[in-house]
Amino acid sequence: MHFLPEKIDEYVVAHSEKEPELLKELTRETYQKILQPIMLSGPYQGRVLSMISKLIRPKTILELGTFTGYATLCLAEGLQTQGEIHTIDVNEELVDFQRKYFDRSNYGNQIHQHLGNALDIIPALDKTFDLVFIDADKPNYSNYFHLIINKLNPGGIIISDNVLWHGKVVEELNPKDLLTKALLAYNTLLKNDERIESVMLPIRDGLTISRKK
Ligand SMILES: C[S@@+](CC[C@H](N)C(=O)[O-])C[C@H]1O[C@@H](n2cnc3c(N)ncnc32)[C@H](O)[C@@H]1O
């Protein structure tokens, strides 16, 4: 999804950091073997996630929605030496694919995969986090926020993906469109919750960065 004019978009990408080779390979294999490869964060958003993580230098990261591990590897680039990233996905068919790329990266033993519904796994994680990336099923975004806010360290950051939902959040709402409805409610929640401050960025399909006060 591009919100910028195509030429500007191309210029922005051309003047941003290049995608690492391993991620290019991961992307190729995802497109060859996995359904809905469009779910990958992709090269530009991936470099944005990497940069944010490097600015924060988190000790602990939580990702909701691993898919084939693209964003996991981007976020891991900013981890402290002893840091760890926990990533959750409900699709067991992706586990071996993810692990193959995690082990080929520099962060293999810092990445902890969790298989199952994030709604069940988050409460069982006895950890607090410096950075959380929410990129799993959209209807549960608000539930995820409520589950993680008390596990987020003061000054900790939540990055929420797809908050513009292909631009549908500014169009007339079809009452049957539950995904757009869920994202509208989520965006309102982030704007109004006094425990955080948020900025929405028109990057790809929309990323909101929220900082716990
Ligand atoms: C958009 S993809 C994630 C993309 C990935 N973060 C990236 O940037 O490359 C969403 C993923 O969320 C997973 N998912 C959906 N519902 C889930 C749930 N309830 N718990 C955990 N994972 C879930 C899907 O299996 C899918 O792999």
Image (cartoon, grey):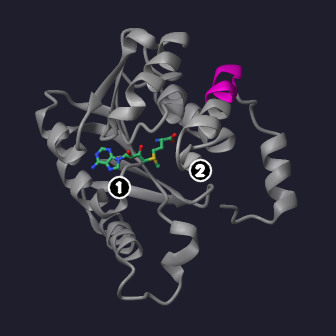
Looking at the rendered structure, the secondary structure element under dot 1 is loop
Residue that badge 2 annotates: 38
Bounds of the magenta segment: 20-26
Is residue 205 shown above or below 47?
below
- For residue 149, the mark is none
Residue 10 is covered by the magenta coloring: no
Nearer the observer, 194 or 46: 46
Is residue 6 shown above or below 67?
below
Residue 22 is covered by the magenta coloring: yes
Amino acid type at mark 1? Asp
Confirm or reject: label 1 Cβ below 8 Å from ligand 1. Answer: yes
Lateral position of residue 25 relative to residue 170, left or right: right
Residue 119 point in image, percent of width and height: 19, 47
Decide if residue 55 is in sight here.
Answer: no
Q: Earlier in the sequence, mark 2 or mark 1?
A: 2
Is residue 14 shown above or below 11?
above
Nearer the observer, 1 or 98: 98
Residue lying at 67% horizontally and 25% vertically, measured from the top left: 25
Residue 195 point in image, percent of width and height: 24, 55
Identify the main secondary structure in magenta.
Answer: helix
Residue 182 point in image, percent of width and height: 33, 71
* Residue 70, quarter of picture: top right
Sort mark 2 into few (<14), some (14-19) or many (20+) by Cα contacts within 10 Å: few
Lateral position of residue 4 relative to residue 187, left or right: right
Amino acid type at mark 2? Ile
* Residue 94, quarter of picture: top left
Is residue 77 shown above or below 213?
above
Sort mark 1 into few (<14), some (14-19) or many (20+) by Cα contacts within 10 Å: few
Residue that badge 1 annotates: 137
Residue lying at 40% horizontally and 25% vertically, measured from the top left: 58
Compute the Cα span from label 2 to label 1: 15 Å
